[in-house]
Amino acid sequence: MTYPVSLRHEKNAYQYNKARLVRITPQTPDTNLYTFEYVDPGIQKQFTFTPGQFILLSIFGYGEAPFGICSSPNKTDSFDLCIRSVGKLTNVLQNLNPDSVVGFRGPFGHGWPMDEVKGKNIVIIGGGIGLVPLRPAILDVIENRDNYGKLQIMYGARCPEELLFKDELYLWGNRRDIEYVATVDRDDEHCWAGNIGVVTVLFDRINISPKDTYALVCGPPIMYKFVLRELEKIGLPDDRVFLSLERRMKCGVGHCSHCLVGSKFVCQDGPVFSYAEVKAQRGAV
Amino acid sequence: MPTEKSKPVVAFYGLTCCAGCQLEVLNLEEELLEILGHINLVQFRMGSSAKHPGPYDVCFVEGSVTNEAELAHLKELREKSKVLVALGACATTGGVNALRNGRNIEELKQSVYGDASHVRTLPQIQPLKEYVKVDYELQGCPIAGDEFIEFLTALLTGGEPSEKNYAVCVECRLKENICLMKEGELCLGPITRAGCGARCPSVGFPCEGCWGPVPQANVESEINMFSQKGASFDVVVRKFRMFNASMEDFMKQLKKRLDIEWL
Amino acid sequence: MGLLPEKVLNEWVIIMAPRSTTSPLILKKGDITPFIKKLTHILTVYGPVAKKTQFVFDEISEGSQLRLDYDTTILPPKKYFIPPQEEMVRFSLSPQLNITSPLEESEEATLWNGKRFVIVGIHSCDLAAIKFHDKILTQVYPDPYRTHRRERGIIIGLNCLTPCEESFCKSTMTLSSTEGADLMLTELHDSYYVDVLTETGQLVIDYTKSLFSSASKEQSKSVEQLLTSREDTFPDLIPEFEKLPERLQVGYEGEMWARLGNRCFGCGACTLVCPTCFCFDVKDRVELDLNQGSRVRNWDSCQLVDFALVAGGHNFRPTIPSRVRFRIYHKFWIEPEQIQVIGCVGCGRCTRTCPADIDMIELLTDIQEGGT
């Protein structure tokens, strides 16, 4: 029998840390890169996260929402979030002035299995804004290139204007130690010389060997079904395919139940799951 | 404190209605002064006879469009206003004004006015959003003061006002009201949008639906439940039409089930 | 105020192992009024009171308001541990962002100065639900707001002797739950037979000692008989209840969800009155001064259309049938997966409150019989 006293816990998951908006760097017409720095230098110094983890951003008076952290896990002086303005909070966010103070809780959840993929080949598959939580993983591989095997990146966006981190994409494309391919769903402006079609067309452009290979996948819900089918064809086992799931989240710590997928909390057990884990959960993908 | 110049210019207008929604705003006695500290209220016939030609930052319009002149007025207000808010049941569902929808309008005119040759009306009463772009809706007959304040606060802070996409039942349970459906009454609560704070059920009256339909309203189940409670066609139709005669989904479902030509 | 020494009050929260500390006692029904009166001197007292034809838990100032003969209440006592609306923080926006939490240890901020309380007359099903929350809301991070209230609430349980309508507590095996209660009452003729289950309970007894007398052996025997006789008087309405999770393994795509969806209003009433439901939504509220505000959590419901809606417009459970199914799977499959306890205590409130007359016993029996 548990008694109230055992409910006590030193971790208060509802503690907010204040951070300052350092700058906003536009990415696409509706998506910006936001750089933040904790007001308390001590907290900033201690701030660490695993690529793929998320953080809860509060603009008091407007609300709180979860966002995948987007910067390199090796960067210590600040951190980045890349956010598309699609809702109440994000619309307020894009109009904030630099030096505005917001609140953060977290980071929370399980990110990409960076330890497990050490020394292995990695295939990264991102669709649209789904590239955001993958970027810290990519940056970590690039910054510690010797720790990992082959890096293959497949990225799809709706149209060329919606490609994120365009400068970096260019660099990735030109590195010999990265195989990078991209596609766009459509090119109405005729400014794109690359592949056209959804992200799965890239499976014809790239040769993925299933041996010692892990796939890290993030994109819109509709994308998973098709990408998973392709990965299965290649022969990648389910426990080496990792997905980041998106769900409505309020608390971030397994209390509010909005993000339940089967018996898993996306906020605590995820947002990154292996496909093997997810397969057992109904309605996950 | 914002200066008079930086405050948003706010106007209230009424089309065909009882003006009860504007009265509800006037009734916010405790908060009214604080509200006036944040806005430049230029047109509000409940408080002042002053007129203002516009343009407006926010324009609240209560009432229904019943004739061409009102329609022209509404269109003009839309053009003059950055944000147009439909205020109350008459503006958001057509309210009781829509009771005449589907009836023979000439007969109705005759019975109300006798010689009615001079009365000009549009054939149907529709929500304002059927005529012009409406940015926000505040439902209810009359509106709820606390919803008005919440809305205004969100607007003033540059936030997005939140919608209550759930039924009156939520508010009834939170108030621990005894469920009137369970008591055999015909209550529209399960298919009516919340916001009133379960105003009627809390004093023992079943919901009449003045906040309009909740999203995904299960109208079919409601009709079934009413029939199970022994309600006649006539009673069911009257209940559904009271505030929602212009709500297509309601009327379509009723028609499907009750086969009444004029619905 | 303060007839009970402050020190003792403070010790409530550090009481360790619960155990039956004294032999059973007797409280005469006529002494309920002075008992409650004495408690109100140091605690806020809640208990079942009549609301027209039904009952609700409410604050008690007079023993005569207390209706220990109640069947069930509209809302369960969870409202005292997870209030329908609760401020998580208060903030002011200018001249600089200032955030204060009710969890801070300062005297005035401690849950905004909430008092210690006692709830009198909680039935076994609701006790089981409180224990359920103790478990499910502490999986990784404990919910600090609920914990705070839980530590400050004393629970006086009450054994049910007659089954109430729509309930199926014998099937859920919550009919004889006493865990979580500090004192447990059983009605015995013109008295209440009192089991002292924890040291907190003993503190209450010590504080109101003069009202209690020792129970005789015969009285103990009578109570034991009363309680065992419930095996016959309470029907097992859903046999093999514990097999529900297993049986839900089939039928996820079944037609029963569409059938239920046709009837269900998606109004969420069933989840609001459910003693084990705990989902919440969080919203910021700014006051009319446009500076002060608070972040508030409100009871939410998985039955509502916005529950699984994400920014950008995708809804993971867009239809009523998909949400009804989720509710059933959450209680009878997901929660057992997570904490090995089925998320239903058989109180029957969902059936009593459903405006579409959906009957939980029927629904579960359908599943048990493999209905799809």
Image (cartoon, rainbow, N blue to C red):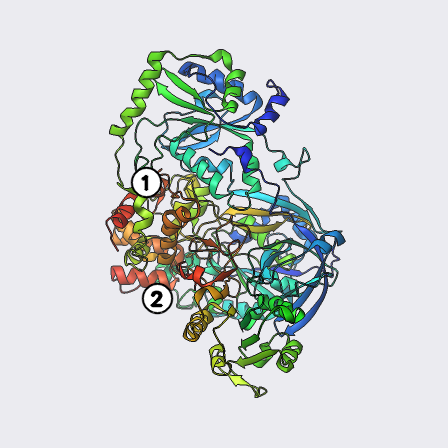
Which residue does the image show at 38% across and 43% down from the upper left? C342
Q: Is residue B207 visible?
A: no
Amino acid under disc 1: Glu
Q: Is residue A200 left or right of residue C149?
A: left
Name the disc covering residue B183, or none: 1
In this view of the protein, which residue sits in the foreground, C338 or C104? C338
Give percent across and percent down for residue C155.
48, 28
Percent across and percent down for residue B60 are 57, 60
Q: Quadrant of residue C3?
A: top right
The residue depicted at 55 percent of the width and 86 percent of the height is: A194
- Looking at the picture, how far across and down is residue B29, in whole percent? 62, 45
* Chain of the residue under label 1: B
Location of residue B218 in the rendering, given as x and y in whole percent from the top left corner: 35, 56
The residue under the point 63% across, 58% down is: A49
Mark 1 lies on a secondary structure that is: loop
Vertical position of residue B222 compared to residue B73: above or below: above
The answer to whether residue C166 is seen in the rendering is: yes
The quarter of the rendered structure image containing the C terminus of chain B is: bottom left
Residue type at the position of mark 2: Glu
**Mark 1 or 2, nearer chain start:** 2
Label 2: how many Cα within 10 Å (few below 14, some 14–19, many 20+):
some
> Number of callouts in the render?
2
Q: In which chain is the residue bearing label 2?
A: B
- Gap in Å between the C-alphas at discs 1 and 2? 41 Å
**Which residue is found at the position 68% from the left and 51% from the top?**
A17
Mark 2 — residue? B106
In this rendered view, identify the residue nearer to me: B102 or A79. Answer: A79
Above/below status of C134 relative to B141 = above
Residue B49, by quadrant, is bottom right
In the visual, does B74 lie left or right of B170? right
